[in-house]
Image (spheres, rainbow, N blue to C red):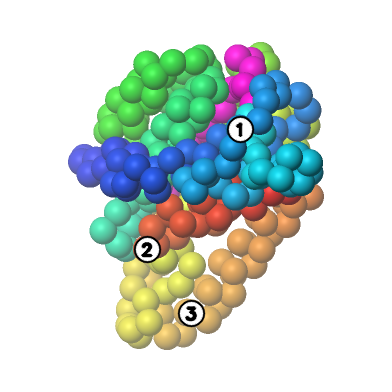
Amino acid sequence: MQLKEFKADLLPKLHELDFSAKRKILNVVTGNLLTSFKGKGFEFEGYRHFTPEDDASRIDWRASLRTSKLLIREFNVEKNYDVFFLIDVSDSMLFTSTDKLKCEYAAELVSTLAFGVTEAGAGLGFAMLNNKLVCKLAPQLGKKQYHYLLKELQNVNNYGGDFDLEEGIKFLLSFLKQKALVIVVSDFIGLKKNWYKYLQILSHKFELIGIVIRDPRDRQLPKEGGQYVLQDPYSDEKIYIDSGEYAEMYAKETSEEEVLLRRKFTLLKSDFLFLSTDSIFTDSVLKFIKKRGDR
Protein backbone atom coordinates (compact mmCIF):
# COMPACT_ATOMS: atom_id res chain seq x y z
CA MET A 1 0.00 0.00 0.00
CA GLN A 2 1.53 3.35 -1.07
CA LEU A 3 0.83 6.63 0.70
CA LYS A 4 -0.16 9.17 -1.97
CA GLU A 5 -0.60 12.31 0.14
CA PHE A 6 0.66 13.36 3.57
CA LYS A 7 -1.47 16.00 5.30
CA ALA A 8 -0.07 16.13 8.85
CA ASP A 9 0.71 19.49 10.42
CA LEU A 10 4.25 19.05 11.71
CA LEU A 11 4.51 22.43 13.40
CA PRO A 12 4.92 21.48 17.07
CA LYS A 13 1.73 22.13 18.98
CA LEU A 14 3.77 24.43 21.23
CA HIS A 15 3.61 27.09 18.50
CA GLU A 16 -0.15 27.33 18.96
CA LEU A 17 0.18 28.28 22.64
CA ASP A 18 0.99 31.56 24.38
CA PHE A 19 4.42 32.08 25.96
CA SER A 20 3.35 31.10 29.47
CA ALA A 21 1.77 27.81 28.37
CA LYS A 22 4.72 27.05 26.07
CA ARG A 23 7.21 27.60 28.93
CA LYS A 24 5.17 25.33 31.20
CA ILE A 25 5.16 22.49 28.65
CA LEU A 26 8.90 22.73 28.03
CA ASN A 27 9.46 22.63 31.79
CA VAL A 28 7.44 19.42 31.98
CA VAL A 29 9.45 17.88 29.14
CA THR A 30 12.86 18.93 30.46
CA GLY A 31 12.06 18.46 34.12
CA ASN A 32 10.12 15.21 33.93
CA LEU A 33 10.73 13.25 30.74
CA LEU A 34 14.47 13.66 30.40
CA THR A 35 15.32 13.66 34.11
CA SER A 36 13.51 10.35 34.58
CA PHE A 37 16.31 8.31 32.96
CA LYS A 38 17.68 5.38 34.91
CA GLY A 39 21.15 5.98 36.28
CA LYS A 40 23.23 9.12 35.96
CA GLY A 41 22.61 11.46 33.11
CA PHE A 42 22.21 14.89 34.62
CA GLU A 43 24.55 17.08 36.60
CA PHE A 44 23.03 19.18 39.37
CA GLU A 45 23.73 22.83 38.57
CA GLY A 46 22.03 24.65 41.45
CA TYR A 47 18.77 26.21 42.61
CA ARG A 48 16.68 29.05 41.29
CA HIS A 49 13.50 30.73 42.52
CA PHE A 50 10.15 29.26 41.46
CA THR A 51 8.07 31.41 39.07
CA PRO A 52 4.36 31.11 38.18
CA GLU A 53 5.33 29.77 34.74
CA ASP A 54 7.23 26.81 36.24
CA ASP A 55 5.84 23.32 36.77
CA ALA A 56 5.15 22.98 40.51
CA SER A 57 6.27 19.33 40.46
CA ARG A 58 9.87 20.53 40.06
CA ILE A 59 9.93 22.34 43.45
CA ASP A 60 12.53 21.01 45.90
CA TRP A 61 10.51 21.17 49.11
CA ARG A 62 13.40 20.39 51.47
CA ALA A 63 15.55 23.20 50.11
CA SER A 64 12.51 25.50 50.09
CA LEU A 65 11.84 24.82 53.78
CA ARG A 66 15.45 25.62 54.68
CA THR A 67 15.38 29.00 52.90
CA SER A 68 11.68 29.88 53.31
CA LYS A 69 11.57 30.44 49.53
CA LEU A 70 10.23 28.21 46.78
CA LEU A 71 13.24 26.75 44.95
CA ILE A 72 13.63 24.59 41.83
CA ARG A 73 16.58 22.29 41.16
CA GLU A 74 18.36 23.01 37.88
CA PHE A 75 20.17 20.30 35.92
CA ASN A 76 22.53 20.23 32.97
CA VAL A 77 21.88 17.43 30.50
CA GLU A 78 24.98 15.37 29.81
CA LYS A 79 25.82 15.28 26.10
CA ASN A 80 25.79 11.49 26.04
CA TYR A 81 22.07 11.27 26.72
CA ASP A 82 19.99 10.60 23.65
CA VAL A 83 16.33 10.17 22.78
CA PHE A 84 15.65 7.83 19.86
CA PHE A 85 12.27 7.41 18.13
CA LEU A 86 11.46 4.09 16.41
CA ILE A 87 8.48 4.93 14.19
CA ASP A 88 6.19 2.34 12.57
CA VAL A 89 5.39 3.37 8.96
CA SER A 90 3.88 0.07 7.79
CA ASP A 91 0.59 -0.48 5.94
CA SER A 92 -1.58 -0.66 9.07
CA MET A 93 -0.46 2.89 9.97
CA LEU A 94 -2.01 4.16 6.70
CA PHE A 95 -5.55 3.47 7.92
CA THR A 96 -8.11 5.96 9.18
CA SER A 97 -11.80 6.30 9.97
CA THR A 98 -11.26 9.92 11.11
CA ASP A 99 -9.74 12.93 9.35
CA LYS A 100 -6.19 11.80 10.14
CA LEU A 101 -4.26 8.68 9.16
CA LYS A 102 -2.55 6.91 12.04
CA CYS A 103 0.83 7.71 10.46
CA GLU A 104 -0.10 11.41 10.26
CA TYR A 105 -1.17 11.43 13.90
CA ALA A 106 2.09 9.66 14.83
CA ALA A 107 4.14 12.18 12.85
CA GLU A 108 2.52 15.13 14.64
CA LEU A 109 3.15 13.47 18.00
CA VAL A 110 6.80 12.67 17.22
CA SER A 111 7.49 16.17 15.84
CA THR A 112 6.15 17.76 19.02
CA LEU A 113 8.10 15.47 21.36
CA ALA A 114 11.25 15.80 19.26
CA PHE A 115 10.99 19.59 19.44
CA GLY A 116 10.89 19.38 23.25
CA VAL A 117 13.87 17.00 23.28
CA THR A 118 15.91 19.36 21.07
CA GLU A 119 15.00 22.38 23.20
CA ALA A 120 16.08 20.43 26.29
CA GLY A 121 19.55 19.95 24.82
CA ALA A 122 19.46 16.15 24.50
CA GLY A 123 20.63 14.19 21.48
CA LEU A 124 17.90 13.27 18.97
CA GLY A 125 17.83 10.28 16.61
CA PHE A 126 15.18 8.24 14.82
CA ALA A 127 14.42 5.35 12.49
CA MET A 128 11.34 4.65 10.38
CA LEU A 129 10.41 0.98 10.22
CA ASN A 130 8.21 -1.37 8.21
CA ASN A 131 9.68 -4.85 7.72
CA LYS A 132 13.07 -3.20 7.31
CA LEU A 133 14.71 0.12 8.14
CA VAL A 134 13.35 2.73 5.73
CA CYS A 135 15.59 5.54 6.98
CA LYS A 136 17.65 6.29 10.06
CA LEU A 137 19.62 9.05 11.74
CA ALA A 138 22.11 8.49 14.56
CA PRO A 139 21.49 10.59 17.69
CA GLN A 140 23.29 13.92 17.84
CA LEU A 141 22.80 17.32 19.40
CA GLY A 142 21.49 20.22 17.35
CA LYS A 143 18.39 21.43 15.56
CA LYS A 144 19.56 20.02 12.22
CA GLN A 145 18.51 16.62 13.60
CA TYR A 146 15.00 17.90 14.16
CA HIS A 147 14.69 19.42 10.68
CA TYR A 148 15.95 16.21 9.06
CA LEU A 149 13.32 14.27 11.02
CA LEU A 150 10.56 16.57 9.72
CA LYS A 151 11.79 16.11 6.15
CA GLU A 152 11.65 12.30 6.41
CA LEU A 153 8.28 12.30 8.17
CA GLN A 154 6.80 14.21 5.23
CA ASN A 155 8.27 11.94 2.55
CA VAL A 156 5.39 9.79 1.24
CA ASN A 157 7.87 7.27 -0.15
CA ASN A 158 8.81 6.27 3.41
CA TYR A 159 5.37 4.81 4.14
CA GLY A 160 3.83 1.39 3.51
CA GLY A 161 4.88 -2.25 3.62
CA ASP A 162 4.79 -5.12 6.09
CA PHE A 163 5.80 -4.76 9.74
CA ASP A 164 8.62 -6.44 11.65
CA LEU A 165 9.32 -5.00 15.10
CA GLU A 166 12.03 -7.60 15.69
CA GLU A 167 14.01 -6.23 12.73
CA GLY A 168 13.84 -2.74 14.19
CA ILE A 169 14.98 -3.89 17.63
CA LYS A 170 17.88 -5.90 16.21
CA PHE A 171 18.96 -2.77 14.38
CA LEU A 172 18.75 -0.62 17.52
CA LEU A 173 20.79 -3.06 19.59
CA SER A 174 23.71 -2.69 17.18
CA PHE A 175 23.15 0.93 16.13
CA LEU A 176 22.83 2.75 19.47
CA LYS A 177 26.20 2.86 21.18
CA GLN A 178 25.37 4.77 24.38
CA LYS A 179 22.59 5.16 26.91
CA ALA A 180 19.33 6.39 25.43
CA LEU A 181 15.62 6.68 25.90
CA VAL A 182 13.96 4.66 23.11
CA ILE A 183 10.38 5.64 22.26
CA VAL A 184 8.58 3.11 20.05
CA VAL A 185 5.61 4.69 18.22
CA SER A 186 3.35 2.12 16.55
CA ASP A 187 -0.16 0.68 16.47
CA PHE A 188 1.48 -2.64 17.48
CA ILE A 189 -0.64 -4.48 14.90
CA GLY A 190 0.92 -7.37 12.98
CA LEU A 191 3.39 -8.36 15.72
CA LYS A 192 5.27 -11.60 15.08
CA LYS A 193 5.81 -14.48 17.47
CA ASN A 194 9.00 -13.36 19.22
CA TRP A 195 8.28 -9.62 19.50
CA TYR A 196 8.20 -9.63 23.31
CA LYS A 197 11.51 -11.46 23.65
CA TYR A 198 13.25 -8.82 21.57
CA LEU A 199 11.50 -6.00 23.42
CA GLN A 200 12.79 -7.55 26.65
CA ILE A 201 16.37 -7.40 25.38
CA LEU A 202 15.88 -3.78 24.30
CA SER A 203 14.48 -2.76 27.71
CA HIS A 204 17.49 -4.26 29.51
CA LYS A 205 19.89 -2.11 27.50
CA PHE A 206 17.91 1.13 27.16
CA GLU A 207 15.16 3.10 28.84
CA LEU A 208 11.95 2.25 26.94
CA ILE A 209 8.57 3.87 26.32
CA GLY A 210 5.86 2.34 24.13
CA ILE A 211 3.30 4.69 22.54
CA VAL A 212 0.39 2.84 20.95
CA ILE A 213 -1.64 4.74 18.35
CA ARG A 214 -4.96 3.25 17.33
CA ASP A 215 -7.86 4.36 15.18
CA PRO A 216 -11.38 4.01 16.67
CA ARG A 217 -12.03 1.23 14.11
CA ASP A 218 -9.07 -0.71 15.50
CA ARG A 219 -11.09 -1.01 18.69
CA GLN A 220 -14.75 -1.12 17.67
CA LEU A 221 -16.83 -1.80 14.58
CA PRO A 222 -19.33 0.86 13.43
CA LYS A 223 -22.36 1.20 15.69
CA GLU A 224 -24.60 1.21 12.66
CA GLY A 225 -25.40 -2.42 11.84
CA GLY A 226 -24.75 -3.68 8.34
CA GLN A 227 -22.46 -5.56 6.00
CA TYR A 228 -18.79 -4.53 6.07
CA VAL A 229 -15.55 -5.69 4.49
CA LEU A 230 -12.52 -6.26 6.73
CA GLN A 231 -9.11 -6.49 5.10
CA ASP A 232 -5.79 -7.63 6.53
CA PRO A 233 -3.42 -4.64 6.11
CA TYR A 234 -0.51 -6.97 5.32
CA SER A 235 -2.22 -9.19 2.74
CA ASP A 236 -5.06 -9.16 0.21
CA GLU A 237 -7.26 -11.31 2.43
CA LYS A 238 -10.78 -9.93 2.96
CA ILE A 239 -13.80 -11.13 4.88
CA TYR A 240 -17.40 -9.93 4.79
CA ILE A 241 -19.15 -9.59 8.13
CA ASP A 242 -22.35 -8.33 9.69
CA SER A 243 -21.21 -5.78 12.27
CA GLY A 244 -24.24 -6.44 14.45
CA GLU A 245 -23.21 -10.08 14.72
CA TYR A 246 -19.48 -9.55 15.35
CA ALA A 247 -19.24 -6.13 17.04
CA GLU A 248 -19.22 -7.49 20.61
CA MET A 249 -16.66 -10.21 19.82
CA TYR A 250 -14.46 -7.72 17.96
CA ALA A 251 -14.50 -5.21 20.84
CA LYS A 252 -13.68 -7.98 23.33
CA GLU A 253 -10.72 -9.22 21.29
CA THR A 254 -9.24 -5.75 20.77
CA SER A 255 -9.72 -4.86 24.45
CA GLU A 256 -7.90 -8.03 25.53
CA GLU A 257 -5.09 -7.20 23.08
CA GLU A 258 -4.67 -3.74 24.65
CA VAL A 259 -4.61 -5.22 28.15
CA LEU A 260 -1.94 -7.70 27.03
CA LEU A 261 0.23 -4.94 25.55
CA ARG A 262 -0.02 -2.89 28.73
CA ARG A 263 0.81 -5.95 30.85
CA LYS A 264 3.88 -6.77 28.74
CA PHE A 265 5.29 -3.26 29.11
CA THR A 266 4.57 -3.34 32.84
CA LEU A 267 6.52 -6.60 33.14
CA LEU A 268 9.43 -4.84 31.45
CA LYS A 269 9.12 -1.98 33.97
CA SER A 270 8.69 0.28 30.98
CA ASP A 271 6.10 2.99 30.42
CA PHE A 272 3.19 2.64 28.06
CA LEU A 273 0.82 5.24 26.60
CA PHE A 274 -2.30 4.49 24.57
CA LEU A 275 -3.57 7.18 22.17
CA SER A 276 -6.56 7.25 19.83
CA THR A 277 -6.62 9.31 16.63
CA ASP A 278 -10.04 10.78 17.45
CA SER A 279 -8.53 12.63 20.45
CA ILE A 280 -5.95 15.43 20.64
CA PHE A 281 -2.77 13.97 22.13
CA THR A 282 -1.41 17.06 23.93
CA ASP A 283 -3.16 16.68 27.29
CA SER A 284 -2.65 12.91 27.45
CA VAL A 285 1.06 13.21 26.68
CA LEU A 286 1.62 15.97 29.24
CA LYS A 287 -0.15 13.99 31.97
CA PHE A 288 1.88 10.91 31.03
CA ILE A 289 5.20 12.77 31.15
CA LYS A 290 4.33 14.51 34.42
CA LYS A 291 3.31 11.23 36.06
CA ARG A 292 6.49 9.57 34.82
CA GLY A 293 8.66 12.38 36.15
CA ASP A 294 6.87 12.45 39.52
CA ARG A 295 7.75 8.77 40.02
- Disc number at residue 246? 3
Three-letter amino acid code of the residue under disc 3: Tyr
Dot 2 crowding, Cα within 10 Å, few <14, some 14–19, many 20+:
some
Task: Name the residue rendered at 42%, 85% in the picture.
Answer: 244
Residue 192 at x, y percent in the picture: 62, 44
- The amino acid type, in three-letter code, at marker 1 is Arg
Q: Residue at x 47, y 79 (%)?
A: 247
Q: Position of residue 256 (x, y in %)?
A: 64, 67
x, y (%) of residue 179? 69, 21
Residue at left offset 30%, top offset 41%: 15
Which of 225 and 124 lies nearest the eye of the viewer? Answer: 124
Residue depth check, mark 1 versus mark 2: number of the one nearer the observer: 1
Q: Name the amino acid type tagged 2.
A: Asp
Q: Residue at x 39, y 62 (%)?
A: 279
Q: Which mark is residue 48?
A: 1
* 52 vs 208, nearest the viewer: 52
- Relative to 194, is 277 on the left or the right? left
User: How many numbered circles are shown?
Assistant: 3
Distance between the alpha carbons at the discs numbered 1 and 2 = 40 Å
Mark toward the start of the polypeptide (1 vs 2): 1
